[in-house]
Image: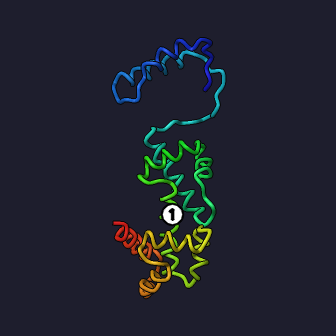
């Protein structure tokens, strides 16, 4: 909602003392501001029927939206700008947000997800290694090989040869996904 407050003094008296803390006084400041605004008639409402949710829930939702977008577009060229735009955030804000909530950079996370998916494809398909690299979003075979070897300590060809027996008797890729995740973390540590 937009409110008319020509000098902004009434609102300023509530906002200026607010800090980014969890002190009870902050709750009182916020309640005072809401009380002040509730007595005013809004100029207009920007979003109708909007229900605000807690900041923690919004953060979790934004993280999930980013991860879902990455997962759905893994084989495409994905940039910080594209995901930030999808979440209606500035690029630099999104980069800091992603790193703070995921504990890794956007770029590193994207590479890890591409390598994981490639490892699954190596075990579950007969696709060529270059096709798998393209399918998961690597622009060149040499880049794919380098990133794969850097994370899983084996080239894609070596990985496929070593794990081909995982194909025997599997009904779903779920068991393969679990094994790939285990190997990924075993090699990362």
In the figure, is residue 149 to the left or right of 187? Answer: right
- Going 54% across and 19% down the picture, which residue do you hit? 37
- Going 39% across and 24% down the picture, which residue do you hit? 26
Task: Residue under label 1, please give it.
Answer: 111
- Viewer-closest of 113 and 167: 113
Element at badge 1?
helix
How busy is the neighbourhood of tag 1: few (under 14 within 10 Å), some, or many (20 plus)?
some
46 up-or-down from 42: above or below: below
- Viewer-closest of 58 and 7: 7
Question: Where in the figure is residue 124, as x and y percent of width and height?
Answer: 50, 81
- Viewer-closest of 148 and 169: 148
Q: How is the image coloured?
A: rainbow
117 up-or-down from 43: above or below: below
151 up-or-down from 56: above or below: below
123 up-or-down from 146: above or below: below
- Viewer-closest of 126 and 143: 143
- Going 48% across and 38% down the picture, which residue do you hit? 53
Question: Where in the figure is residue 150, as x and y percent of width and height?
Answer: 45, 69
- Going 40% across and 70% down the picture, which residue do you hit? 184
Q: Quadrant of the C terminus?
A: bottom left
Question: Where in the figure is residue 95, as x and y percent of width and height?
Answer: 52, 47
Q: Quadrant of the N terminus?
A: top right
């Amino acid at each position: 909602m937009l409110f008319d407050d020509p000098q902004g003094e009434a609102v300023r008296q509530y906002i200026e003392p607010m800090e980014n803390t969890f002190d009870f006084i902050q709750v009182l400041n916020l309640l005072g501001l809401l009380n002040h605004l509730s007595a005013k008639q809004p100029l207009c409402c920007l979003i109708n029927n909007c229900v605000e949710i807690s900041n923690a829930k919004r953060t979790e939702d934004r993280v999930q939206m980013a991860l879902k977008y990455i997962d759905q577009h893994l084989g495409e060229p994905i940039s910080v700008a594209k995901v930030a735009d999808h979440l209606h955030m500035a690029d630099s804000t999104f980069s800091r947000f992603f790193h703070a909530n995921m504990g890794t950079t956007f770029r590193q996370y994207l590479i890890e997800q591409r390598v994981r998916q490639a490892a699954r494809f190596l075990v579950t398909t007969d696709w060529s290694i270059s096709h798998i690299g393209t399918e998961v979003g690597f622009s060149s075979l040499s880049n794919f090989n380098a990133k794969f070897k850097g994370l899983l300590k084996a080239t894609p060809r070596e990985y496929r040869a070593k794990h081909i027996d995982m194909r025997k008797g599997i009904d779903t890729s779920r068991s393969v996904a679990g094994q790939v995740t285990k190997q990924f973390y075993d090699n990362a540590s």
